[in-house]
Image (cartoon, rainbow, N blue to C red):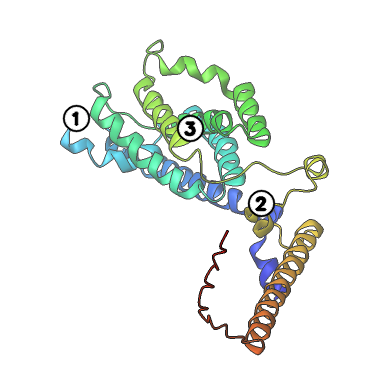
């Protein structure tokens, strides 16, 4: 029983491993494609996202893996490593679905509304991750996730200017498409995923209130959870005893009334005649 409970609790080390594993998997993929392209001169950038062109449809799935040069891929690598790790660490239960929806929808939006040309690079995903992490902490009003929001603003606040057409040869449409998808997903999943943590001072101030069930499931071995479970069991046992005692009392009353089964008969009486007195 205890082993089952322990297996449902996710440790910080497991969260870190999960976030780094998926992040490095994607980075190894884009670097592998880039190095193979450079080594064999395959010109893989031809398969980028070309808006409203049939030959560019495949680019919806391929353009994040393609990069034009060393500076391009390195800048995207550093930003993606930080933002994607934050997503998979703090939003573990939502990370995969958010990532894949963002990957597909940002490419589709770019193909539909992007400017003419060949769009390549993972910057659309980076803007989507930054937008999701920024807005999700705000709409959830979660103190821990608000810290993530502030970190994103501090590190990548200047990226907002590259969503405007102010620099040549920069896919600002791809940046805008990714940011829009990230914002939409932040609002769509605002009631799912991580919940507000309960701190010790909050528990002490509201000691008379029961702990939330979701928190106890996530922390099955916490002393407060064990105490709450024991309290619930005692209250349930007390309720069952009270119900049994009420049933016994009702049975005693019924049997007592049955023992004193008295039948009352009504016997009519003849009315008395009034005697008249002579004067």
Q: Which residue is mark 3?
A: 126
- Is 127 situated above or below 40? above
Tell me which numbered mark, 2 or 1, is placed earlier along the sequence.
1
Q: Mark 3 packing: few (<14 Cα in 10 Å), some, or many (20+)?
A: many
The residues tagged by marks 2 and 3 sit, at their Cα atoms, a distance apart of: 35 Å
Residue 212 is labelled as 2
Q: Left or right: 48 with respect to 122? A: left
Q: What residue is rendered at 48% in x and 47% in y?
A: 26
- Mark 1 burial class by Cα count in 10 Å: few <14, some 14-19, many 20+: some
List x then y, in percent, for residue 199. Answer: 77, 42
Question: Splitting the image into 4 quarters, where does residue 33 fall?
Answer: top left
**1 left or right of 270 in image:** right
Q: Which mark is residue 52?
A: 1
For the C terminus, which image quadrant?
bottom right
Front: mark 2 or 3: 2
Along the line of sight, which residue is nearer the eye, 37 or 206? 206
Q: Is residue 42 visible?
A: no
Q: Nearer the viewer, residue 164 or 243?
A: 243
| Callout 1–callout 3 Cβ contact below 8 Å | no
Q: Taking the image as drawn, is residue 134 in sight?
A: yes
Labels 2 and 3: the sequence-earlier one: 3
Say if 220 sits above or below 260 in the image.
above
Question: Considering the numbered disc 3 on the image, is that residue within a helix, a strand or a loop?
Answer: helix
Mark 2 vs mark 1, CA separation in Å = 50 Å
Residue 158: x and y in percent read: 55, 17
SS at circle 1: loop
Residue drawn at (41%, 25%), measured in percent from left and top?
175
Q: Tell which of 37 and 197 is nearer to you.
A: 197
Residue at (69% x, 57% y) in the render = 216
């Amino acid at each position: 029983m205890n082993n089952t409970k322990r297996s449902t609790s996710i440790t910080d080390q497991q969260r870190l491993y999960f976030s780094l594993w998926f992040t490095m998997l994607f980075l190894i993929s884009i670097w592998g494609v880039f190095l193979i392209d450079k080594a064999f001169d395959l010109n893989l950038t031809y398969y980028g996202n070309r808006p409203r062109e049939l030959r560019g449809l495949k680019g919806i799935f391929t353009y994040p893996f393609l990069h034009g040069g060393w500076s391009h891929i390195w800048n995207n690598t550093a930003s993606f490593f930080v933002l994607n790790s934050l997503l998979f660490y703090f939003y573990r239960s939502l990370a995969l679905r958010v990532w894949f929806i963002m990957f597909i929808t940002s490419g589709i939006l770019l193909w539909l509304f992007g400017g003419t040309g060949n769009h390549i690079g993972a910057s659309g995903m980076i803007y989507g991750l930054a937008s999701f992490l920024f807005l999700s902490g705000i709409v959830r009003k979660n103190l821990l996730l608000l810290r993530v929001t502030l970190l994103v603003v501090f590190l990548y606040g200047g990226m907002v200017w590259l969503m405007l057409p102010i620099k040549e040869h920069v896919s600002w449409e791809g940046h805008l498409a990714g940011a829009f998808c990230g914002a939409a997903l932040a609002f769509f999943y605002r009631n799912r995923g991580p919940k507000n943590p309960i701190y010790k001072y909050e528990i002490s101030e509201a000691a008379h209130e029961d702990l939330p069930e979701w928190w106890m499931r996530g922390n099955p071995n916490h002393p407060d959870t064990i105490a709450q479970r024991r309290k619930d069991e005692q209250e349930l046992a007390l309720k069952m005893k009270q119900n049994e005692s009420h049933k016994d009392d009702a049975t005693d009353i019924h049997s007592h009334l049955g023992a004193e089964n008295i039948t009352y008969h009504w016997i009519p009486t003849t009315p008395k005649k009034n005697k008249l007195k002579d004067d």
